[in-house]
Image: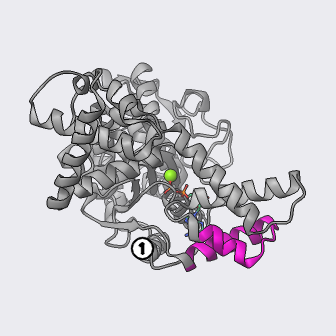
Amino acid sequence: MTKDCHMVWDSCLRIIKKSVPPQSYKTWFEPIRPVHLNNSELTIQVPNKFFYEWLEEHYVQLLKTSIRQELGERGRLLYHIMEGAQNGTNKTSEPTHSQPSADKDNEPVPGVFDAEMIKNPFVIPGIRRIKIDPQINPNYQFDNFIEGDCNRLARNAGMAVAKKPGGTAFNPLVIFGDVGLGKTHLAHAIGNEVVNRYADKMVLYVSAEKFTNQIIQAIKNNAVNDFVNFYQMIDVLILDDIQFLSGKQKTQEIFFHIFNQLHQNGKQIILTSDRPPKDLEGIQDRLISRFKWGLSADLQAPDLETRMAILGAKMEVEGVDIPNDVLEFICYNIKNNIRELEGVMISLMAQSTLIRRDVDIELAKEVIRNFVTTINKEITVEFIQELVAEHFNVPVERLHQETRKRNIVIARQLSMFLAKKLTNKSLKAIGETFGGRDHSTVIYSCKAVQDMMDTDMIFMDTVSELEKKIKMSLNH
Ligand code: ADP
Ligand code: MG
């Protein structure tokens, strides 16, 4: 009886199935189709180059054994690589000769493994094995991520995930919190820890912004499939600042697909966000519901002791010596943003070297005051109007016009209130920036907002959230 390619491949699969974990079998062998058998040469079709490479990298021995068992010592395997699937037409590339019996260190197979052709920004060209640069910052480690009540849950969950990527219930792990509280640091620390523990795991850190830009590029180059395939091979994917995906439908769609594949295959996903998943606006519900599958852990503003420990540790690394009372003074005054805390320390050191003054509380006061007034100087009424209008989802011009529409009236009154509170502008000047209203309107508005805050807790939260956002936005 003559064998056909299906029979041969089925027999190979039976051998392979016994030797690899079910999940790997499903991922790497089920998608393969036998296409041709010519004497002792079996041709199989694989979805893309990455796939081919993965097989060669991880399963060459197994493939060799099974092929030889079926086709004898002269048994050979050839690959067809499907390409251009995103266009709907599956063009088959020239069959390329790859001998499972070949030495692993042999020259790359010509034609198939052309690093130039791999449309992925992270592939290090010229290296035969798939090696990606994980894009993690070696300075951000667990060791220098000081633990406090404010971050204990997130830090411990991060450590658990790093020890067993994909193997805990924390998948995805969502780290959320305000700007400057350590989300990016912690995300990198997890990446570093995984790389240290598991040299063979593919880790990738990418900001949501970069991810979005890559998708735009991939669409331009007609390479969305390559893009998706690449991301599906990652073991630990860290996507920073997912709020950036808001409103970007195509990116969300592609990420949804990648997320599902990774999650299904037991790969670890780590996300950071400036707010809890449920509050993400402009993000598809199906994504938000997936973000909630694992654990969402927040980073809060650190208490005084933790702030001092963080700053103390930074100073030690930098070789900076600041008297304790000054350290405490700084930490006492800068509460909500660790990056700012570091900023003050750096300015303080700069001042002391430039004007050769001892670092004391007087100098610290001047630096902090400078810090704070430069921040205040930058807050403009226009900026407040923009943020408030955006929050209420109304065009900013509407704030200047006559209207009785309730949400616009509230947005306008609130903008006035915040302008009064956060800028040095006079009532008259504020009124003018709202389509030429007079100062008594501004007074009335401020009182109306105050009354609402006194009676409506939710409104009060909105106001403080916006206030914080306005202050924070200026730190960039
Ligand atoms: P986010 O991404 O939340 O805006 P970052 O991760 O960029 O914040 O952190 C801002 C700065 O604060 C970084 O320099 C980071 O190293 C530092 N930082 C934050 N939390 C800690 C911590 N617990 N221990 C030490 N440094 C911290
Ligand atoms: Mg960050």
Can residue 289 be seen here? The reply is: no
**Which residue is painted at 86% across and 65% down in the image?**
358
Q: Is mark 1 within 8 Å of ligand 1?
A: no
In the image, 220: left or right of 129?
Answer: left
Tell me how many marks there are.
1
Q: Please say if 223 is above or below 303.
A: above
Q: Image check: 240 left or right of 373?
A: left
List x then y, in percent, for residue 444: 21, 41
Looking at the image, which is closer to me, 187 or 64? 187
Depth check: give the residue in front, 7 or 412: 412
- Secondary structure category for the residue under label 1: helix
Instruction: Tell me the kind of residue under disc 1.
Output: Ala
Magenta residue check for 320? yes
The quadrant of the rendering that contains the N terminus is top left
Residue 150 in percent (x, y) is at 45, 74
User: What's the residue at 40%, 76% (across, down)?
Assistant: 153
Is-magenta flag for residue 466? no
Residue 86, quarter of the rendered image: top left
Q: Quadrant of residue 48?
A: top left
Farthest right residue in view: 356
Residue 127 to residue 202: above or below = above
Which residue is drawn at the image coordinates 68% and 61% (left, top)? Answer: 365
Expressed as whole percent of the image width and height from the top left, the position of residue 393 reads: 22, 34
Secondary structure mainly formed by the magenta segment: helix
Give the residue pinned by disc 1: 157
Q: Residue at x 45, y 48 (%)?
A: 471
**What span is in magenta?**
305-331
**Residue in the foreground of this view, choosing between 432 and 261:** 432
